[in-house]
């Protein structure tokens, strides 16, 4: 058990080290998400007091779209030098590779959000520095990386993987996206935890279901 | 010539054509016009059966995808791809007929009602399933990965439905048409027609899946032949 | 001939009716092959004969469509992780993280193989393949030949029972090839197994115990005296090469 955790952490830490050197993924995700936010501040008139109404949706749509590009990039890096095959050669079960890669993707999207969410607070003039935001953000990012790592691993050999990943990823994460948007809405309207409890429970159920199923199913993905 | 025509007359085709005739008679001649919605209500006799067909499609894709991952037998993969294609066609008909019905009755083409949202998201997942199969290089890896999408879709379905339900409670659908919440005045006649029509479309669904399965089998046999002939060509050259 | 007796369970590799297709291309068409422990086997055949695919199957990067493969008596489809611990592979790509140093790469893969005493192990391995001076250089800055050596170090680090080498000489200078030969010889004298492909056929036939010519997805020729059967092997091999 400890050995497995060490392997998962080693893969995640390796991704983090490469990311610190290249800054390929976090910059792409944060940059893309910030642009979505800025464009929406022009597309929607925020002076009508509707920031609470549209803000949460814009935030999570931006993070979801930006996340897809990041997931694509993260897996492409592992394929370019055939290093994914080096991981496959190792005497570890495939689910550890999945969990390690998912950990790396979780860290990338989480770090990108640390940049994006404060900018969102400024542009939309909303109070977001609350524990609720942390909980929503963590649950959503876990689900995004759970599903995204699985589908990114599947899309690497597809001709048009930049197209394929969002087509697979976005419909499947829709319930999680609804949970994120609705809970964030409750938060910006200043409602309590109990108002968003059902949505958070849904997000937890989504995360657990897809982490377990994906880890179990990943053994069928890698070999050609 | 005559033999070829007779070959095409599959019993399932005959059965579904006959039932379709009965259903058409019931829909357009036998059943009286519903008083609240008017003639447009007859679309439901079409809409409900194709929706049922698309649900069967999703169910069969999920089941046979799971079986393929478990047994690795090609026949489950063929069944999955056949029912995915037919299911997506039925799904498209369901979405279109539903919108045509909703515009006069609900006064909107589309609304965030739970069943509609769920159907639309599932439709996208199975379109992605078919696109993935089209884009991925051929081989057993493609079959495995497609089966995984089928299983993931099945896992996602209850979560999508639960989320769509919660969402529509928070944002009640804007339904303002003339018969938004009037009870149907047809009673048991409605049930009779829906039953006949659903049976007709079910047999059509099964017939289409069966036909697509056979074509798929022929495609696989052709690939097998090409592999074998490339082998004998190489041996012949030595 | 190697001292190890080849009983059924002592076979390093036992492939039984292995079939692998990629779409319309049939790569392996019912391949049967038994390789005893302690031999150096060189796989020969024209492009697309299935040499690399067979190595990838042994390395568990490629799944077979039907048939069975066992290594040291263990079925590979049912015991993945434990079988992968038996093999060390150097395939076409170096399979290294280009933006990490040689040391970081080796440390990372040591963790993947759950090795102990990693520092000593790395020190010993890099000396064996001759990469000490570049230990703290990023892999991206190294020449192709050097990357190959690092890949070899990665494959040797966990001291595998079997080495799988896919054209290991490509990109290596003559000195490095000599070093590779001595590593292969060490392996053989330790009673272990090497399965390799090569593009320096004549040289490989000198050092190999067995030559297997793959033809049309099956075994075309299986010689246990490659250095004396050289003419026959070359004829079988080059007649196929001319067909392409």
Image: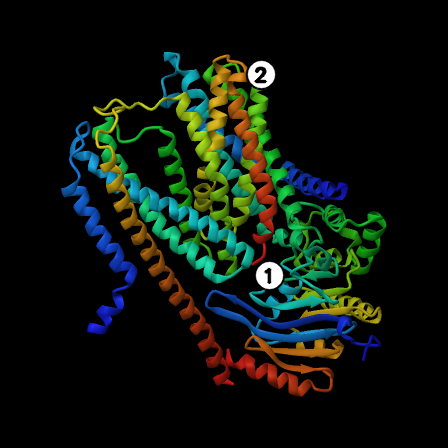
Query: A196 or C228: which is nearer to us?
Result: A196
Label 1 lies in what chain?
A: C
Q: Which numbered tag is attached to residue A130?
A: 2
Query: C114 or A186: which is nearer to us?
Result: A186
- Residue A32, relative to residue C22: is it above or below? above
- Would residue A68 be found to the left or right of residue C81 on screen? left
- Check if mark 1 and mark 2 are on a common chain: no
* Relative image position of residue C77 (x, y in whole percent): 65, 61
Q: How is the image coloured?
A: rainbow
- Residue A112, relative to residue A1: is it above or below? above
Position of the N terminus of chain B, as image quadrant, is bottom left
Quarter of the view holding residue B209: bottom left
Quarter of the view holding residue B125: top left
* Relative image position of residue A158 (x, y in whole percent): 47, 52
Q: Are marks 1 and 2 in contact (CB under 8 Å)?
A: no
Query: What distance separates the C-alpha of mark 1 from that of mark 2?
Result: 49 Å
Q: Secondary structure at mark 1?
A: loop
Whether residue B193 is visible to the viewer of this picture, yes or no, is yes
Q: Secondary structure at mark 2?
A: loop
The residue that label 1 is drawn on is C62
Q: Which numbered tag is attached to residue B101?
A: none
């Amino acid at each position: 058990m400890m050995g497995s955790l060490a392997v998962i952490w080693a893969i995640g830490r390796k991704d983090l080290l490469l990311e610190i050197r290249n800054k390929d993924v976090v910059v792409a995700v944060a940059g893309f998400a910030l642009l979505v936010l800025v464009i929406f501040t022009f597309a929607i008139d925020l002076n009508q007091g509707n920031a609470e109404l549209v803000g949460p949706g814009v935030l999570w749509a931006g993070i979801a779209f930006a996340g897809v590009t990041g997931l694509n990039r993260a897996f492409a890096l592992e394929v370019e030098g055939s290093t994914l095959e080096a991981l496959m050669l190792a005497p570890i079960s495939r689910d550890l590779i999945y969990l390690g890669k998912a950990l790396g993707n979780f860290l990338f999207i989480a770090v990108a959000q640390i940049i994006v969410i404060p900018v969102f607070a400024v542009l939309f003039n909303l109070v977001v520095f609350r524990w609720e935001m942390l909980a929503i953000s963590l649950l959503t990012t876990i689900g995004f990386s759970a599903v995204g790592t699985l589908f990114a691993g599947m899309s690497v050999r597809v001709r048009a993987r930049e197209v394929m990943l969002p087509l697979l990823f976005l419909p499947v994460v829709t319930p999680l996206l609804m949970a994120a948007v609705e809970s964030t809405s409750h938060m910006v309207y200043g409602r309590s935890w109990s108002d968003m409890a059902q949505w958070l429970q849904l997000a937890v159920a989504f995360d657990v279901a897809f982490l377990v199923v994906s880890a179990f199913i990943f053994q069928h993905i890698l070999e050609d | 010539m005559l033999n070829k025509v007779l070959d095409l007359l599959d019993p399932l085709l005959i059965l579904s054509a006959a039932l379709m005739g009965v259903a058409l008679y019931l829909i357009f001649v036998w059943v009286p016009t519903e008083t609240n919605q008017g003639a447009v209500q007859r679309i439901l006799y079409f809409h409900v059966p194709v929706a049922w067909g698309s649900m069967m499609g999703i169910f069969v894709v999920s089941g046979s995808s799971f079986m393929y991952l478990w047994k690795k037998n090609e026949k489950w993969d063929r069944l999955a791809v056949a029912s995915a294609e037919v299911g997506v066609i039925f799904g498209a008909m369901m979405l279109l007929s539903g919108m045509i019905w909703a515009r006069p009755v609900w006064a909107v083409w589309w609304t965030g009602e739970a069943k509609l949202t769920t159907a639309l998201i599932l439709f996208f997942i199975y379109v992605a399933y078919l696109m993935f199969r089209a884009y991925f290089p051929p081989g057993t890896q493609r079959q495995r990965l497609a089966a995984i999408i089928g299983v993931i879709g099945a896992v996602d379905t209850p979560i999508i439905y639960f989320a769509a339900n919660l969402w529509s409670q928070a944002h009640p659908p804007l339904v303002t048409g003339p018969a938004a919440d009037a009870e149907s005045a047809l009673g048991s006649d409605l049930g009779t027609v829906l039953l006949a029509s659903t049976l007709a479309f079910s047999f059509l669904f099964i017939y289409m899946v069966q036909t697509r399965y056979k074509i798929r089998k022929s495609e696989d046999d052709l690939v097998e032949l090409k592999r074998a002939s490339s082998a004998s060509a190489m041996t012949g050259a030595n | 001939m190697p001292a190890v007796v080849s009983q059924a369970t002592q076979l390093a590799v036992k492939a039984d009716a292995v079939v692998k297709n990629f779409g319309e291309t049939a790569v392996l068409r019912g391949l049967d092959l038994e390789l005893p422990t302690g031999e150096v086997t060189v796989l020969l055949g024209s492009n697309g004969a299935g040499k690399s695919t067979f190595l990838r199957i042994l390395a568990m990067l490629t799944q077979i469509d039907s048939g069975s493969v066992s290594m040291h008596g263990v079925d590979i489809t049912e015991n993945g992780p434990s079988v992968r611990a038996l093999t060390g592979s150097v395939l076409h790509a170096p399979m290294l993280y280009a933006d990490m140093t040689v040391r970081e790469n080796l440390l990372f893969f040591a963790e993947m193989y759950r090795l102990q005493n990693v520092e000593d192990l790395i020190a010993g391995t890099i000396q064996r393949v001759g990469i000490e001076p570049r230990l703290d250089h990023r892999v991206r800055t190294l020449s192709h030949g050097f990357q190959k050596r690092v890949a070899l170090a990665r494959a040797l680090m966990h001291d595998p029972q079997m080495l799988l080498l896919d054209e290991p000489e490509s990109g290596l200078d003559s000195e490095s090839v000599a070093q590779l030969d001595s590593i292969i010889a060490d392996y053989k004298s330790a009673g272990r197994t090497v399965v390799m492909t090569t593009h320096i056929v004549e040289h490989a036939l000198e050092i190999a115990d067995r030559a297997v010519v793959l033809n049309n997805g099956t075994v075309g020729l299986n010689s246990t005296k490659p250095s004396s059967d050289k003419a026959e092997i070359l004829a079988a091999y080059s007649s196929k090469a001319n067909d392409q």
